[in-house]
Image (cartoon, rainbow, N blue to C red):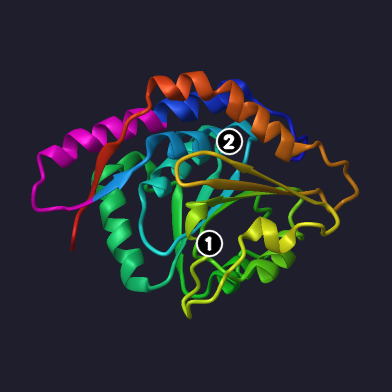
Amino acid sequence: MEGEKWCPQAAMKAYLSTLHLCRESARGGAERSSSRSVVAEPECMEFISALAAGNGARLIVEIASKTTPLTVALAVAAKQTGGQMVCILPAQQQVERCKGYISTRYPDLKDIIKFASGDPCEAMRSLGDQNVEFAVINGEFGEHLQLLEIMRKSRGCSIVVERLERSGKGAGGGVVSSFGEAVRGREGVESVSLPVSGGMEVTRIKNNNGGKSSGAATTTADNHDKMGSERRRSRRRFLVTVESR
């Protein structure tokens, strides 16, 4: 992503591959009545996968509170770019469960995804000098400024907050700002909100090596509009199942 060029072919391939996996998961879920069911919004997963692949991200990180179908969507994007995806979960038990699920249901992605557990910021620091180019966090994550300082070391990075409507619900009942709100106004940072699924926020951290900001947040909004008609044709919900272990 160092050249910050948008690749529509890679974006569309990731978009269609994610759509295909949504459909396959829906069919598999209909046959497994004993599984724990999760309703997922495919237009959100497809768009994020396409955004990561279209930007050529070779190291993608997801900070999640639990296993989600978005993990698979991001792995699809990493496979498309020839890169790697890292999923950070709260507990090692969740990591083991997710590894087993991916190996069983998506064996072609098992070598694309690496897992880590524990404090998200510490897990991010453990990546060392690796250049994180694309990250996805859920609306419950609250260590915004710590994450910003870690991500500034990357040579340009996009951060997506999905399920934005949950960002105001702190564990103690207090109001928690979203990532974009917390970092807005800081040098080299731009952010845009998109009306996708339960709300989405895309924040771009400028290349810290002196490169120009390409207006990536604005470009993201433009790409979202261009892909809108294709997404509306597949605007439906799929039942995605995750095995209880």
How many numbered discs, if any?
2
- Could you tell me the amino acid type at mark 1? Ser
Dividing the image into 4 quarters, which one contains the N terminus? top right
Q: Residues within 10 Å of mark 2 (few under 14, many from 20)?
A: many
Query: Dot 2: what SS?
Result: helix
Q: Quadrant of residue 16?
A: top left
**Is most of the magenta stretch helix, strand or loop?**
helix
Q: Position of residue 182 (x, y in %)?
A: 70, 64
Q: Is residue 88 above or below residue 207?
A: below
Using the image, tell me which numbered label, if any, was put on residue 148: none
Report the residue at 31% width, 50% height from top.
102
Which residue in the protein does label 1 denote? 167
Of the pair 137 and 5, the residue shown nearer to us: 137
Dividing the image into 4 quarters, which one contains the C terminus? bottom left
Image position of 137 (left or right of 30): right
Q: Position of residue 166 (x, y in %)?
A: 47, 60
Of the pair 243 and 38, the residue shown nearer to us: 38
Let me know if residue 222 is in the magenta part. no
Q: Quadrant of residue 91?
A: bottom left
Mark yes or no: residue 1 visible. Answer: no
Residue at the limit of the structure toward the right, as seen here? 210
Using the image, tell me which numbered label, if any, was put on residue 51: 2
Report the residue at 49% width, 65% height from top.
140
Report the residue at 74% width, 55% height from top.
154
Q: Is residue 173 above or below residue 85?
A: below
Image position of 66 (left or right of 140): left
Report the residue at 31% width, 71% height from top.
93
Q: Residues within 10 Å of mark 1 (few under 14, many from 20)?
A: some
Q: Position of residue 79 (x, y in %)?
A: 48, 37
Of the pair 150 and 107, the residue shown nearer to us: 150
Q: Which residues are magenta?
A: 18-37
